[in-house]
Amino acid sequence: MSCVLCDSDGGELVWQDGHCRVIVANEAGYPGLIRVVWGAHVAELSDLTLAERHHLMAVVTTVERVVRETMRPTKVNLAALGNMVPHLHWHVIPRYADDAHFPQAIWGSVQRPVPNDVAADRAAMAQHLPDALQKALAVELH
């Protein structure tokens, strides 16, 4: 069975170790959306050992902190759905009260348009994420 997260990085690869990788997904309308992808093909968090879960959550937590510092969102959403791609991965999503879907999930109904200048500002902030993530992950997960 083919798996997009086994067959490709799934986005712009920013960092990886022997267990997982961090990618910039930059979904349309959501610059700064990051995915933390577990390397082995497992579907659920409970498929991992306790040590593996701790490692994965340390990576997710570091990514969340860097997204908060870099993107200055109203809120960060963490999601590990896997309904469409049953390969364990976390979405780290900067959210703003004026984003297109807020307060709904980004996969929900559009609530409002986002002005071009606001979208451009957020895209500019997201350009700093790869370097910031690499530095933080190198220090915190050495």
Image: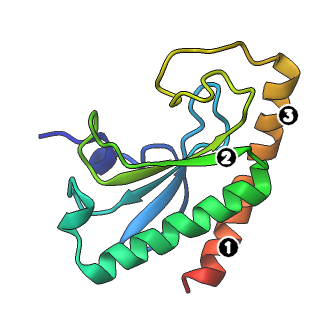
Q: Residues within 10 Å of mark 3 (few under 14, many from 20)?
A: few
The residue carrying pointer 2 sits among few (fewer than 14), some (14 to 19) or many (20 or more) residues within 10 Å by Cα, namely few
Q: Compared to 138, does 68 lie above or below?
A: above
Residue at (77% x, 59% y) in the render: 69
Q: Look at label 1 and name its amino acid.
A: Ala
Image quadrant in which you'd find residue 85 = top left
Mark 1 vs mark 3, CA separation in Å:
23 Å
Distance from the alpha carbon under mark 3 to that under mark 2:
17 Å
User: Which element type, helix, strand or loop, lies under badge 2?
Assistant: strand
User: Crowdedness of circle 1 by 10 Å Cα count: few (<14), some, many (20+)?
Assistant: some
**Rendered image quadrant of residue 118:** top right
Q: Earlier in the sequence, mark 2 or mark 1?
A: 2
Quadrant in which the C terminus appears: bottom right
Residue type at the position of mark 3: Asp
Q: Are marks 2 and 1 in contact (CB under 8 Å)?
A: no
- Measure the alpha-carbon separation of dots 2 and 1: 20 Å
Can residue 18 be seen here? The reply is no
Under circle 3, the secondary element is helix
User: Image height check: is 98 above or below 34?
Assistant: above
- Which mark, by number, is residue 75? 2
Name the secondary structure under disc 1.
Answer: helix
Which is nearer the eye, 75 or 134?
75
Q: State the residue position of label 3.
A: 121
